[in-house]
Image (spheres, rainbow, N blue to C red):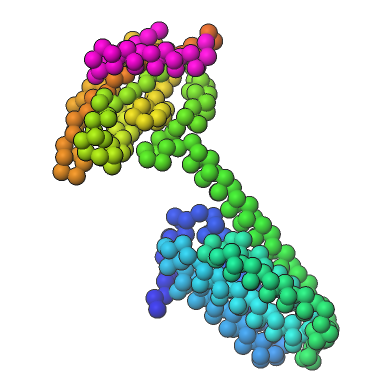
């Protein structure tokens, strides 16, 4: 059993999303709450509840310092989830049994009903079984006369204090869980949007991102250079070395384009075609940039396993004037220029106005 240092855990947390960070501070909050209750029960001389809260503090320390780093690395939070689930039910059931519902410890029964929304590692059947059990338990405690009165000789004023303290802590936990759920949904939405607008092979933008990219470029200029680039004889690469080699070539070319054009918007237009946008440029500059790209790719050597591959590209280029035409018109013109370059022998740049 390896016990991690707090500095190690915090360093690992810095690399993680809000989901894991808030989960960590949730464990710290729960541990602190039990430490507070332990001190109160020491003051009230209730040894059994002192021991229960001491055990709860130990469980949360184990979750943080022993399971914390492995959980962050594996992204499997089921062990911590089961420990927290058992601790919440066991300690608060016993406290409610001994002090009655007036003390308010039964509020915490509702927290395990919400945890499966946040813990990623449970199957659907486990979620429903846990939910059914906690609903049954909460209803039984609420309607059963067994929990109406305290079994310990404790002043009613202290029971009221525990009630308000537990209600306050419970509401704070509910607020934190709601915030965590909102963060989780936002992260999921951002990832979904990212996946929709990115090509999974090259991680370049795809066609779905075109309108956004054009709009972003037009913030600085109404004139936009458009390059449509196509790999020459790409079918021969696939036929000769296999589609895996072809995919590897596309990945390497995408990486090379990012280095050649670090400040431009690059999209994988489909198949072996790439679209590059140059804001605020003129025809001569655009042609020189296209030639620079073509020559750098021609002089490059791509590697696949033990093979060294040479590659050339044909580029169709044009200027898009926002005030006089639609972007679709410019794309059609660049596509025609690309077609002409292919007909004229490939490995060349064609500029159409």
Instruction: Name, please, the residue furthest toward the front.
Output: 239
x and y percent of residue 106 in the render?
74, 76
x and y percent of residue 52 in the render?
63, 85
Q: Residue at x 39, y 15 (%)?
A: 334
Image quarter where the C terminus lies is: top left
x and y percent of residue 317 in the render?
36, 15
> Would residue 202 be counted in the magenta stretch?
no
Image quarter where the N terminus lies is: bottom left
Residue 229, above or below 239: above
Q: Quadrant of residue 22?
A: bottom right
Query: In front here: 116 or 71?
Result: 116
Residue 6, above or below 145: above
103 sits left or right of 315 in the view: right
Q: Quadrant of residue 171?
A: bottom right
Q: Residue at x 66, y 91 (%)?
A: 47
> Would residue 343 be counted in the magenta stretch?
yes
317 sits left or right of 118 in the view: left
- The magenta region covers 325-353
The mark total stands at: 0
Q: Residue at x 51, y 45 (%)?
A: 191
Q: Quadrant of residue 263?
A: top left
Query: In front here: 8 or 195?
Result: 195
Q: Residue at x 38, y 13 (%)?
A: 336
Residue 281 visible: no
Residue 36, above or below 120: below
x and y percent of residue 264 in the render?
39, 26
Residue 337, above or below 5: above
Residue 160 visible: yes
């Amino acid at each position: 059993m390896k016990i991690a240092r707090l500095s190690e855990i915090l360093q690992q947390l810095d690399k993680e999303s809000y989901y894991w960070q808030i989960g960590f501070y949730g464990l710290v909050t729960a541990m602190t709450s039990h430490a507070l209750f332990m001190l109160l029960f020491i003051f009230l001389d209730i040894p059994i509840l002192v021991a229960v809260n001491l055990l709860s503090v130990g469980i949360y320390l184990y979750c943080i310092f022993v399971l914390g780093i492995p959980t962050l690395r594996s992204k499997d939070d089921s062990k911590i989830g089961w420990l927290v689930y058992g601790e919440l039910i066991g300690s608060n059931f016993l406290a409610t049994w001994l002090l009655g519902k007036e003390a308010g410890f039964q509020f915490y029964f509702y927290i395990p009903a919400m945890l499966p929304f946040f813990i990623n590692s449970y199957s659907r059947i486990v979620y429903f079984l846990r939910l059914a059990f906690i609903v049954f338990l909460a209803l039984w405690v609420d309607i059963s006369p067994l929990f109406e009165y305290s079994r310990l000789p404790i002043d009613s004023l202290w029971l009221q204090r525990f009630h308000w303290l537990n209600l306050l802590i419970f509401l704070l936990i509910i607020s934190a869980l709601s915030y965590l759920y909102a963060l989780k949904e936002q992260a999921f939405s951002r990832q979904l949007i990212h996946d929709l607008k990115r090509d999974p092979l090259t991680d370049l933008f795809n066609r779905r991102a075109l309108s956004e990219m054009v709009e972003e470029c037009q913030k600085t200029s109404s004139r936009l250079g458009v390059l449509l680039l196509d790999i020459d004889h790409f079918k021969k690469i696939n036929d000769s070395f296999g589609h895996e080699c072809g995919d590897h070539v596309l990945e390497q070319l995408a990486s090379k384009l990012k280095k050649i054009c670090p400040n431009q918007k690059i999209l994988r237009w489909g198949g072996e075609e790439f679209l590059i946008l140059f804001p605020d440029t003129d025809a001569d500059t655009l042609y020189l940039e296209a030639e620079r790209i073509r020559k750098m790719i021609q002089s490059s050597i791509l590697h696949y396993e033990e093979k060294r591959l040479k590659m050339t590209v044909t580029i169709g280029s044009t200027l898009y004037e926002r005030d006089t035409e639609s972007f679709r018109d410019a794309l059609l013109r660049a596509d025609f220029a690309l077609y002409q370059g292919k007909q004229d022998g490939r490995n060349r740049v064609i500029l159409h106005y």
